[in-house]
Image: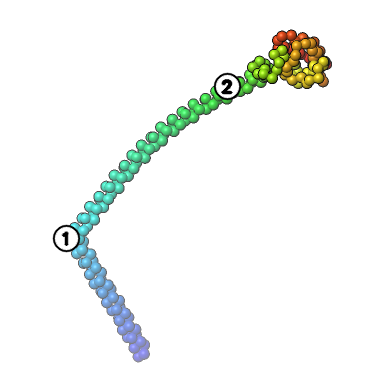
Amino acid sequence: MKLAFTLLLLNLILSFLIFQVIKFFIRLTKIALVFLKFFVISFFHQSEPVKDIQKTVQQKREKIRTELKTKANKLIKDLQVQEKAFQSQKKEFKKALSYERKVGRYQATFVWFFIILFTIFFDDIKYAYLNWKINNQSTQNHQPKDYFLTVNTKPLNSIVTIININRKYHLGMWLKPGKYIIQVEHPDYFNEYRCITIKNHNISINVQLKKR
């Protein structure tokens, strides 16, 4: 008896649950049909204002897309023109730089050539300049009968002494007419003596010492 009642109770509970599940699915189906009907109506039966709005939006989109495409093409063309101009300027700059380097090499070669020549002929240039300076020197502070003496020595750092006067020798010094004894000395060379006579003109002599 109890077993039969229990089975009956379980059967009722199971039937109730099945009913509730079927009822839930029926409601869910109705709701889905309502939404489907709404979307179908909205898709196939759009109102005129909505269509107009969509058309306007589409036209604006097309217009904006066209404008952007035009601006992009113009920008690309401008960039291409600027790139061509830059490449042209780059070529001109390289050409100018190559020319400047070539000129710089020529200038450097000329400067070194001038330095070498100046070094070789330094002594001759020095004596030529001193003689020119002495020949063009003003004689206002000297008596008309004074003449200058120049002693060119080799080696250059030799010591020149005029024995028979008390004055110290310097290049192009002024002397009165007369006889003078000149001594040229250097620690590494033999001394050399010269006797000169100044009469009525300037005197320039060359003295080359002999190695010890």
Q: Is residue 128 visible?
A: no
Can you say which quadrant of the picture contains the C terminus? top right
Q: Which of 14 and 187 is in front in this view?
A: 187
Tell me if residue 91 comes above or below residue 74 in the rendering. above
Q: Earlier in the sequence, mark 2 or mark 1?
A: 1
Q: Which residue is denoted by mark 1 in the rendering? A: 48
Q: Which residue is denoted by mark 2 in the rendering? A: 110
The amino acid at mark 2 is: Phe
Q: Is residue 11 left or right of residue 161?
A: left
Residue at 61% of width from left, 23% of height from top? Answer: 112
Label 2 packing within 10 angstroms: few (<14), some (14-19), many (20+)? few
Quarter of the view holding residue 185: top right
User: What percent of the width, then of the height, locates residue 134?
Assistant: 67, 17
The amino acid at mark 1 is: Glu
Picture disc at residue 212: none
Rounded to the nearest angstrom, the CA distance separating label 2 from label 1 is 92 Å
Q: Are marks 2 and 1 in contact (CB under 8 Å)?
A: no
Q: Nearer the viewer, residue 16 or 104?
A: 104
Q: Is residue 99 visible?
A: yes
User: What percent of the width, then of the height, locates residue 145?
Assistant: 71, 12
For the residue labelled by badge 2, is the local secondary structure a helix, a strand or a loop?
Answer: helix
Q: Is residue 104 left or right of residue 150?
A: left
For the residue labelled by badge 1, is the local secondary structure a helix, a strand or a loop?
Answer: helix
Quarter of the view holding residue 82: top left
Quarter of the view holding residue 195: top right
Q: In this view, does 149 lie to the left or right of 5?
A: right
